[in-house]
Amino acid sequence: MAIATPEFDYLRQLVMERSAIVLEPGKEYLAESRLLSLARRTGCENVESLLARLKSAPENGLHSQVVEAMTTNETLFFRDAHPFEMFRTRALPDLIASRSSERRLTILCAACSSGQEPYSIAMLVKEHFPQLASWSLRLMAADLSTEILARARAGRYSQLEVNRGLPAAYLVKYFRRQGIEWEISEEIRRMVEFFPMNLAGPWPFLPALDVVFMRNVLIYFDIPTKKSILAKARGVLKPDGHLVLGGAETTFNVDEGFERFPGATAGWYRLRMN
């Protein structure tokens, strides 16, 4: 049963108000796939019935659950590979050299979803940069969805999830089997701190950041929201810090305070040098 236009328009407005994410017309199929299990869990016959219930009900936790379900996006370990290679071979060695006196690094993974990106960074650091064990390394990870953050903190993944992007050697070294799932080691979990954060809303207090990973999320926002988010990222980045976007995302014609990092892969930016 297709979602009726009034219910879908209500969903689009709800998602926009809560997360600033633009849900384009014609994406009823996306709502069906994201919300069907929630509809069934709450005793609704279908997604349209779920949305009709929300429209007629006063504000409650179900509204937030619907928004979170619509804003939870796909992720995988070492997604796209090249940003992690750039981080390992150039960005992190450069930062280690420039921070050698203070011996402190702070990294943020924004829109971290179920945690594969920050855990990938943690494993990469553990595997290739043992000297950072004596540094103050703060690896922060944030997402809008409290439900997905709970999954990320648990560090448990299905066989399919560990098969996607995770090197077999890392699976053996940093995971253990727990029933039908794989659980990441306590050592790696302790390296990452997760917290809720709405990119489109006011940001919590953040320390000055060396690297901000904010990949494959700007594509969901309109131009004014992109401008606002990038301005906030500029405000928390150190002058020689790095901003990492998705390969199809750009700051060009959106925020002239950034420029492409010379010789870097697509999506890698720094504050514009005067």
Image: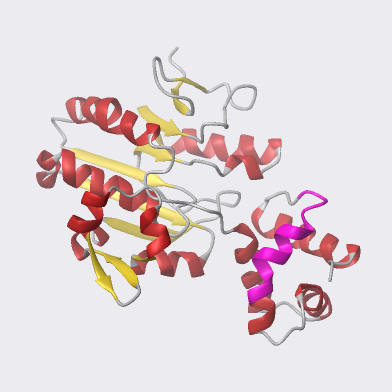
Q: Residue at x 56, y 44 (%)?
A: 217
**Would residue 88 appear left or right of 216 to someone viewing this image?**
left
Q: Quadrant of the C terminus?
A: top left
Q: Is residue 239 visible?
A: no
Q: Residue 122 placed where, x, y %?
A: 26, 49
**Would residue 1 appear left or right of 129 to someone viewing this image?**
right
Furthest toward the bottom, the residue is 43
Write the start and end of the magenta stretch as one range: 24-37
From this view, report whether residue 176 is shown above or below residue 211.
below
Q: Is residue 49 visible?
A: yes
Q: Quadrant of the N terminus?
A: bottom right
- Magenta segment: does it hold 257? no
Q: Residue at x 63, y 27 (%)?
A: 254
Q: Pick the residue in front: 116 or 163.
A: 163
**Would residue 6 appear left or right of 28 to someone viewing this image?**
right
- Magenta segment: does it hold 30? yes
Quarter of the view holding residue 239: top left
Quarter of the view holding residue 44: bottom right
Q: Residue 260 placed where, x, y %?
A: 47, 20
Q: Residue 155 placed where, x, y %?
A: 33, 65
Q: Residue at x 44, y 34 (%)?
A: 244
| Magenta region, main secondary structure | helix
Q: Residue 45 placed where, x, y %?
A: 77, 83
**Would residue 142 appear left or right of 13 to someone viewing this image?**
left
Give the total of numbered labels. 0
